[in-house]
Image (spheres, rainbow, N blue to C red):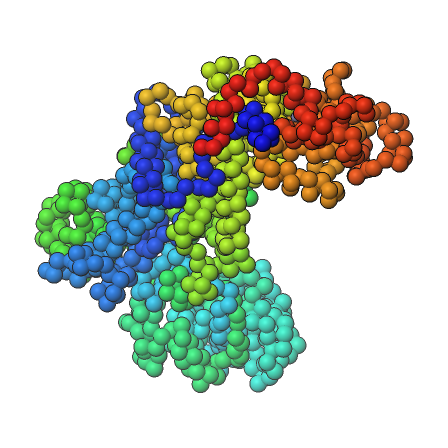
């Protein structure tokens, strides 16, 4: 009864948002989507001069459902761009999709049932290539629609704006023109070169389309190549010189290879200049030349080990590489006389020091072939089988055999029959695989188009020096890749993509490039909406329709080659520039992608931008890792650990998903799983609960008054200093794209400062007269806290921040332009009330933290305290304030109490939430500790000794209004148990409780 009436005299918070996040109704989601679409469009239109922040979106493949990797990437981008918007920048962030490429083409094959709906059925009268292309486009459109909807559900600010896609007519036309420009600059060329060839996909692959597997098993072979003669001027030892001649070769070169199937294409053997070689004897009596340092068979050619019973005799002679250079040997299959050549790529740490050279099947081999004019023989078809004009009649039995499997064994059999195989060893080593088919690839020479990476390398590296790369640990990774990239094959033998606009001479096969044809065809694409004509028309028709008069009366053919998809996406900056999406320098302020894009999009964009504009397309790059489960395994359907972002949203809300993604941030191996998602959900709930309380506590704050002058309590001033530190740390974290640090700072603020502070000021907020300066001071600080935490939360958890923003007691924090949509994302990141960084305020902040630590340490060990704390929490009305008296011993205690402060009602007792705080001199403290008193806990916090004593019930009473247990002023005090404490009695005497009725009504809402 009486408690209820006192309750009416308290200033309890008026909660403006519910404890639990509201259910996700489609209407609510749609309202938010529209609000953010308006806000995004508004800030683009807003005419005020503002710095541009351009976040250029690396396009994901439009070939599947949205997954957690997308969520991580898009939430990072969205959080950073929302932050930049709060910082007053004009944000340009347009979503993009990569629509071409083999994965999409494979899904669009007529045999695949996943080819899309009936409405997507292509016209029956078009060519087979165009049927595939049309189905692939329809499939990509479906994926884009699905992914875009998901991005909207995740709250991506720009997800409702227009996007870009690499298959749009404008994009394709732009790309054709870029090729024309590159051709005129001499930066593209056609060449017969060894490229990574996937026979399982029947196409050349770029480095970025390979995965290296460490468990690849090869049959490595030690092959005998009969030495015919030495160079005339070689200073060879007598033992070697006595070679036996062409008819009866006495010595053999012992050559090691891990790819026996390339031996038919052998053209030379290379030795390392500067290395030493020796002559040794095999068990069968034959003598072989090997590197002097070679330890013998076994261990995969690397040396050491058992050797499989094949032992070599002691060296018969040792000599420098010069003795071998210029010598000739007999080809193991064709019997041709082939040269021994010097090459720096031969090293002592691998093999026998004698390296088999097949210019069609290796990059160093190819370079060596160019240098010494070796024949370039290829006897491997596009299907990866032996065949074609290069295969001689003597090797007929290899014809049609698959090189990487049975072909390898067939070659070894041939060698065995010719007694040229000294030894074989299985070797497990790193080997490139086709990332799509999971099959090993081979190096095979074919005619392809290339971008001149060698010619661009130095410029690209110089350009890269100007790019900031985040996080710091990744700064060197891209440089190494750009520096090492040998060449970039930009052609693919597929149909779903942008055709390479080149015709070829029918008899020689040489390219016939016509700039006019490219430019007019680009116009045609832009006008008609697709490049399908290229696949529909014959070479002659194309030449007649688009080409210049140069092409008339020539016998031409066309190739079906399309551009590598990295050439598509690598030009997205050019399309973005034309759409006005880049900054004033024509660059992106930031790109954020997975680590693999150093090899992929980041480098293809860099090379093409440097080639066409001379500068990098971006100012800074940030990379994140690839999501794994909580035990560190990759996400995989077969393991069953794939997390569906839509399911996460159903369970934890979009902000739960976002908090997980933001806290993963730029981590190397971000993990996801039930435990981490529940933890993320917990953090969102804590933030929600905290913000809800802040909202409730400031509901009656007259915000028209200057908040700054209201601060009169040292705890409040100290807390503002802590809040200012927090804001600075959030700024630093966002500037480094480190949303993980943003989350950690938020968690730390809540647990170490904002939470304890809120607990400490509840007494003042609830029990003090509404207008009392101490209460207004706390409210003013809480208003600043509400603003800072809401603003820091808004980029990461926009759904929660928007809900809080709409529930503010006034219209916004005062930083939003008057005529703009009512969204927190258009607020200004300004905290004038936190600008006081004077020494005295900083000191107050440090002291407040020390008091919070002191309190939790002093009470940590006390079970009775824990019980009292939970009992007080259950009461929920009253501020937590147990019946403890703290005795603090130190003359240098932070926050010395004021001279005439009652130890029961002073600011120390209030902030430490206990019945009384007395500060005593060190000597007195020691005697109190020694005396027989009821000490609950006794701890020493550095300089400050703390004694916690229970306030004995017989000399105290629990105040029915504020719920504090307060010692009676004197032993003779005769107050009853329900007696108000002195402070409450004084407050009530002031007669301010007149609005008690309205206060109670409000709490019942
Ligand atoms: Zn009281």
Left or right, 67 with reference to 123: right
Q: Which quadrant is the C terminus positioned in?
A: top left
Quadrant hosting residue 862: top right
Left or right, 238 with reference to 207: right
Q: What residue appears at the point 28 percent right and 71 percent down from the top-left corner?
A: 389
In this view, 893 is above or below 353: above
Q: Which quadrant is the N terminus positioned in?
A: top right
In this view, 849 is above or below 338: above
Q: Position of residue 904 (x, y in %)?
A: 73, 24
- Quick check: can you spot residue 50? yes
Q: What residue appears at the point 9 percent right and 49 percent down from the top-left corner?
A: 544
Q: Position of residue 950 (x, y in %)?
A: 77, 35
Residue in front for this viewpoint, 108 or 22: 22
Quadrant hosting residue 762: top right
- Quick check: can you spot residue 312? no
Q: What residue appears at the point 10 percent right and 60 percent down from the top-left corner?
A: 125
Residue in front for this viewpoint, 199 or 623: 623
Count all numbered tags in the image, as a single digit.
0
Q: Position of residue 687 (x, y in %)?
A: 52, 38
Q: What residue appears at the point 45 percent right and 70 percent down from the top-left corner?
A: 259
Left or right, 315 with reference to 36: right
In this view, 912 is above or below 561: above
Quadrant hosting residue 130: bottom left
Ligand 1's image quarter is: top right
In this view, 809 is above or below 650: above
Q: Position of residue 819 (x, y in %)?
A: 32, 21
């Amino acid at each position: 009864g009486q408690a209820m009436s006192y309750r009416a005299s308290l200033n309890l918070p008026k909660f403006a948002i519910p404890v639990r996040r509201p259910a996700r109704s489609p209407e609510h989601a749609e309202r938010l989507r529209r609000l953010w679409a308006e806000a995004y469009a508004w800030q683009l239109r807003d005419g005020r001069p503002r710095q541009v922040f351009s976040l250029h979106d690396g396009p994901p493949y439009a070939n599947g459902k949205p997954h957690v990797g997308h969520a991580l990437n898009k939430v990072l981008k969205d959080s950073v761009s929302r932050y930049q918007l709060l910082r007053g920048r004009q944000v340009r962030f347009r979503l993009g999709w990569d629509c071409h490429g083999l994965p999409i083409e494979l899904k669009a094959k007529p045999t695949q049932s996943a080819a899309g709906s009936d409405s997507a059925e292509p016209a029956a009268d078009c060519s087979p290539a165009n049927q595939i292309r049309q189905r692939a486009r329809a499939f990509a459109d479906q994926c884009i629609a699905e992914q875009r909807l998901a991005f909207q559900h995740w709250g991506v600010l720009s997800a409702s704006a227009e996007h870009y896609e690499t298959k749009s007519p404008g994009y394709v036309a732009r790309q054709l023109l870029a090729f024309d420009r590159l051709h005129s600059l001499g930066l593209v060329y056609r060449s017969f070169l060894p490229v990574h060839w996937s026979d399982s996909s029947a196409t050349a692959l770029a480095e970025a389309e390979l995965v290296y597997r460490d468990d690849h098993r090869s049959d490595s072979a030690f092959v005998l190549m009969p030495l015919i003669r030495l160079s005339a001027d070689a200073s060879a030892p007598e033992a070697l010189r006595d070679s036996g001649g062409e008819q009866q070769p006495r010595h053999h070169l012992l050559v090691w290879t891990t790819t026996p199937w390339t031996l038919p294409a052998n053209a030379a053997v290379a030795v390392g200049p500067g290395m030493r070689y020796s002559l040794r004897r095999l068990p069968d009596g034959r003598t072989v030349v090997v590197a002097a340092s070679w330890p013998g068979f076994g261990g995969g050619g690397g040396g050491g080990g058992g050797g499989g019973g094949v032992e070599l005799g002691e060296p018969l002679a040792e000599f420098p590489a010069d003795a071998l250079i210029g010598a000739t040997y007999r080809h193991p299959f064709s019997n041709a006389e082939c040269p021994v050549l010097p090459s720096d790529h031969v090293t002592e740490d691998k093999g026998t020091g004698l390296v088999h050279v097949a210019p069609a099947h290796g990059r160093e081999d190819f370079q060596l072939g160019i240098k010494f004019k070796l024949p370039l023989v290829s006897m491997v078809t596009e299907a990866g089988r032996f065949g074609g004009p290069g295969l001689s009649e003597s090797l007929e039995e290899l014809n049609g055999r698959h090189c990487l499997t049975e072909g390898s064994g067939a070659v070894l059999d041939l060698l065995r029959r010719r007694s040229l195989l000294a030894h074989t060893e299985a070797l497990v080593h790193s080997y490139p695989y086709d990332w799509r088919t999971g099959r090993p690839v081979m190096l095979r020479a074919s005619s392809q188009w290339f971008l001149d990476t060698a010619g661009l390398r130095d410029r690209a590296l110089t350009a890269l020096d100007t790019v900031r790369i985040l996080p710091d640990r990744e700064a060197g990774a891209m440089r190494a890749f750009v520096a090492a990239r040998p060449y970039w094959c930009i052609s693919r033998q597929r149909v779903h993509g942008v055709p390479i606009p080149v015709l070829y001479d029918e008899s020689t096969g040489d390219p016939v490039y016509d700039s006019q044809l490219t430019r007019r065809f680009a116009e045609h694409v832009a006008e008609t909406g697709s490049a399908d004509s290229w696949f529909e028309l014959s070479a002659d028709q194309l030449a007649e329709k688009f080409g210049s008069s140069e092409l008339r009366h020539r016998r031409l053919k066309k190739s079906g080659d399309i551009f590598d998809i990295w050439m598509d996406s690598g030009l997205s900056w050019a399309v973005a520039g034309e759409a006005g999406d880049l900054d004033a320098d024509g660059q992106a302020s930031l790109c954020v992608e997975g680590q693999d894009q150093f090899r992929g999009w980041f480098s293809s964009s860099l090379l093409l931008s440097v080639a066409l504009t001379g500068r990098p397309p971006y100012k800074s790059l940030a990379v994140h890792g690839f999501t794994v489960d909580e035990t560190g395994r990759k996400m995989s359907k077969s393991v069953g650990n794939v997390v569906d972002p839509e399911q996460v949203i159903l369970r934890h809300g979009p902000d739960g998903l976002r908090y997980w993604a933001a806290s993963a941030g730029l981590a190397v191996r971000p993990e996801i799983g039930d435990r981490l998602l529940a933890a993320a959900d917990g953090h969102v709930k804590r933030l929600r609960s905290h913000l809800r309380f802040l909202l409730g506590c400031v509901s009656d704050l007259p915000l028209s008054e200057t908040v700054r002058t209201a601060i009169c309590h040292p705890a409040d001033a100290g807390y503002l200093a802590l809040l200012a530190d927090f804001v600075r740390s959030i700024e630093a974290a966002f500037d480094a794209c480190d949303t993980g640090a943003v989350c950690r700072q938020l968690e730390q603020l809540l647990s170490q400062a904002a939470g304890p502070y809120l607990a400490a000021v509840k007494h003042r907020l609830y029990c003090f007269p509404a207008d009392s300066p101490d209460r207004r001071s706390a409210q003013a600080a809480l208003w600043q806290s509400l603003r800072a935490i809401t603003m820091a939360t808004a980029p990461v958890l926009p759904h929660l921040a928007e809900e809080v923003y709409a529930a503010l007691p006034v219209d916004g924090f005062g930083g939003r332009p008057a005529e703009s949509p009512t969204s927190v994302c258009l607020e200004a990141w300004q905290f004038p009330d936190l600008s006081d960084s004077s020494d005295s305020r900083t000191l107050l902040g440090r002291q407040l933290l020390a008091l919070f630590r002191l309190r939790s340490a002093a009470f940590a060990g006390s079970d009775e305290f824990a019980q009292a704390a939970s009992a007080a929490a259950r009461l929920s009305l009253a501020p937590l304030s147990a019946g403890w008296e703290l005795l603090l011993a130190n003359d240098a205690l932070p926050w010395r109490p004021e001279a005439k402060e009652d130890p029961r009602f002073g600011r120390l007792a209030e902030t430490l939430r206990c019945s009384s705080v007395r500060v005593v001199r060190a000597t007195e403290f020691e005697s109190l500790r020694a005396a027989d008193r009821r000490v609950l806990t006794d701890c020493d916090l550095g300089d400050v000794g703390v004694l916690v004593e229970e306030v004995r019930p017989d000399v105290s009473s629990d105040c029915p209004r504020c719920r504090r247990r307060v010692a009676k002023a004197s032993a003779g005090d005769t107050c009853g148990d329900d007696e108000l404490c002195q402070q409450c009695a004084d407050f009530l005497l002031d007669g301010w409780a007149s609005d008690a009725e309205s206060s109670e009504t409000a709490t019942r809402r």
